[in-house]
Amino acid sequence: MDFNLNHLRSFLVVARIGNLSAAAKELKTTQPNLGRQMTALSKEVGMALFNRHSRGVALTEQGQEYFALCERIVGQLEQDTMLIREKGSEAHGTLKIMAGVGAGQVILDHLPLFSLKYPKLCFKISSITDIFQFKIGDADVGIIPTHSSDSDLIQHHLYNMDLRFYAAPSYLEARGMPKTLEDLYHHNMIIFSGDTSEIAQSLNLHLTGDPVKDSKYKNFIDVNNGLALRKALLNSLGIGSFWYDADLLDQRLLVDVFPDMPSRRIPYYLVYHKRLEGSLKIQAFQELMKELIKIWEAPQK
């Protein structure tokens, strides 16, 4: 039986998302093409993999077993191939990094020096922090704001990200400085909606972490990535919960709205699959992280 690896990878994405249209968007293909792939795969394996319903597709009982099998095979093939290529050489090839809120920006800022030390490494950086990507080889290493219960992942606590309320000085001059959290009800709030539901639920980044209080705020802008949140704050569009950034504060580009209030602290983890233990690329990335931890840690409040 001949298996098309691309069909298997597409199957994993469709099974995870449960919707052909959304899966096609993630895979950068069309829904009809993806549908044909799934039909071809079902014929190749000789069993129905999906049941259709009003909102999309769901795995059949056999499809669930096949999903677990493909998850192991595809991920292991991708990552074991990388380890074989690395043997007897220095770190080289493409390091696929998943970086959560704020982490990607700092990594990019320090890649030039890192690249001088490892000139044969190339990088692929994704801001979508989905634990599933480690299983199928779409990510080698990640800086993730949640601790997974998956025993196949190696997870090292890396640093704590402090979230505080910030706004641009010009916004506060025009609208006034709030004195309490309740005063925020009368301000334009910039809301972070998270990357994936798993990360958003773990972080509870939206504002205060209290869903009852957060529902009362005026969501002036809702963003789903760190750069957009930063830009909205700098453009004086409102007040938002943002991570500590010494440069922005030192230059008075942003102001800490409640300087005496304790920060909300979010733990971040360095994560990779057990299959990649010993990888030269992972070891190189860990060296970079040791240098960057002091940049992310905020002064204690």
Image (spheres, helix red, strand yellow):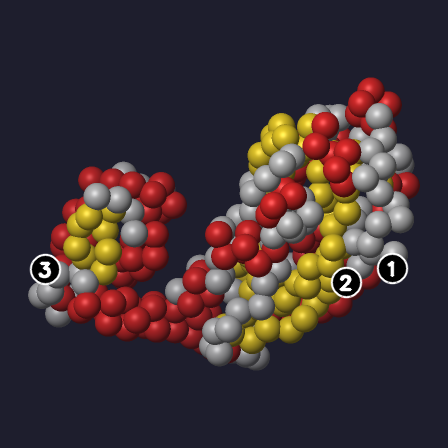
- Please give the residue where the numbered disc 1 appears in the rendered image: 300
Q: How far apart are the alpha carbons under marks 1 and 2?
A: 15 Å
117 and 150: which one is in front? Answer: 150
Q: Residues within 10 Å of mark 1 (few under 14, many from 20)?
A: few
- Please give the residue where the numbered disc 3 appears in the rendered image: 43
| Three-letter code for the amino acid on which mark 3 is drawn | Lys
Residue 169 horizontal/vertical position (percent) = 85, 28
Helix or strand or loop: what does disc 1 sit on?
loop
Residue 161 horizontal/vertical position (percent) = 73, 57
| Three-letter code for the amino acid on which mark 1 is drawn | Gln
Determine the residue positioned at 72% across, 44% down.
Answer: 242
87 and 222: which one is in front? Answer: 222
Determine the residue positioned at 63% across, 30% down.
Answer: 218
Q: How far apart are the alpha carbons under marks 1 and 3?
A: 59 Å
Helix or strand or loop: what does disc 3 sit on?
helix
Kindly indicate the quadrant of the structure image that contains residue 3.
bottom left
- Please give the residue where the numbered disc 2 appears in the rendered image: 293
| Three-letter code for the amino acid on which mark 2 is drawn | Ile
